[in-house]
Amino acid sequence: KAGVTQTPRYLIKTRGQQVTLSCSPISGHRSVSWYQQTPGQGLQFLFEYFSETQRNKGNFPGRFSGRQFSNSRSEMNVSTLELGDSALYLCASSLRSYGGDLTDTQYFGPGTRLTVL
Amino acid sequence: KNQVEQSPQSLIILEGKNCTLQCNYTVSPFSNLRWYKQDTGRGPVSLTIMTFSENTKSNGRYTATLDADTKQSSLHITASQLSDSASYICVVSLNDYKLSFGAGTTVTVRA
């Protein structure tokens, strides 16, 4: 079974631009979560999607948004990029079904390294 | 203030030696605690998941313990190998599916 894939792997943008990152979960996984990882802050939760609906949201400004498609693929968008948005953006998928097991394992993709100049 | 604190921030050990990483948390209501291993340039990989009723769980040379009363967890690495060099992240899952992450411990194994 193929793992979680993220595209692109590397991205360089300038301040004020916007960016869209893509995540393809493991086949059969319906939950997709997004995280931001920086050396100073570590891993921080952005949001989670399940069945095309945002189920959970972290403490990030509205410039960060996402969506999930009917095939469970997900995209994350960051508008009006700031220097502080430079980070590794990780996507993780799981079998999670809401109301069910809370111990489902998340499988992470390799991440997209975003550099904002 | 982070609700999941890990210590030490980093450590260096010789190949073949054992080491123990610590994780203290204050988040509640607690559902489960996870340990992840993250190699440089890669996404995290799940090592163990423990519910509040479990005291210990092993995955090969990795053994995690949990004391839900004191809100402490540890990850013990036995007979370390060079491939154990990575960042180890403690994650606490709340009952509402939200995850709270520790900053991680960077382990360097030297030959």
Image (cartoon, rainbow, N blue to C red):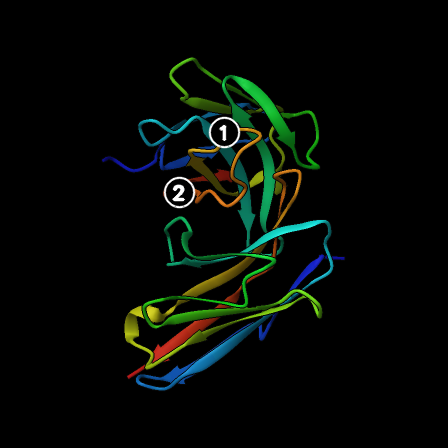
Q: Residue at x 58, y 75 (%)?
A: B8
User: Where residue A54 appears, x then y in whole percent?
Assistant: 59, 23
Task: Tell which tag, 2 or 1, sits nearer the viewer.
Answer: 1
Going 29% across and 76% down the picture, which residue do you hit? B81
Q: Position of residue A16 (x, y in %)?
A: 61, 26
Q: Residues within 10 Å of mark 1 (few under 14, many from 20)?
A: some
Q: Is residue A82 above or below residue B80?
A: above
Q: Nearer the viewer, residue B80 or A110?
A: B80
Q: Which mark is residue B24?
A: none
Quarter of the rendering containing residue B18: bottom left
Residue at mark 2: A107
Q: Nearer the viewer, residue B101 or A37?
A: B101
Q: Quadrant of the N terminus of chain A?
A: top left
Q: Is B95 above or below relative to A67? A: below
Farthest residue in the left direction?
Answer: A1
Mark 2 closeness class: few <14, some 14–19, many ≥20 residues within 10 Å: many
Q: Amino acid at mark 1?
A: Ser
Is residue A53 shown left or right of residue A71?
A: right
Please report whichever mark, 2 or 1, sits nearer to the chain's N-terminal start: 1
Disc 2 secondary structure class: strand
Q: CA distance from mark 2 to mark 1?
A: 15 Å
Q: Is residue A117 visible?
A: no
Residue A5 seen by the camera: yes
Residue B5: % across, % down? 66, 65
Circle 2 marks a residue in which chain?
A: A
Judge left or right: residue B14 versus residue B72: left
What amino acid type should be assigned to the residue bearing mark 2? Tyr
Q: Secondary structure at mark 1?
A: loop
Q: Quadrant of residue B109?
A: bottom left
Which label sits on residue A97? 1
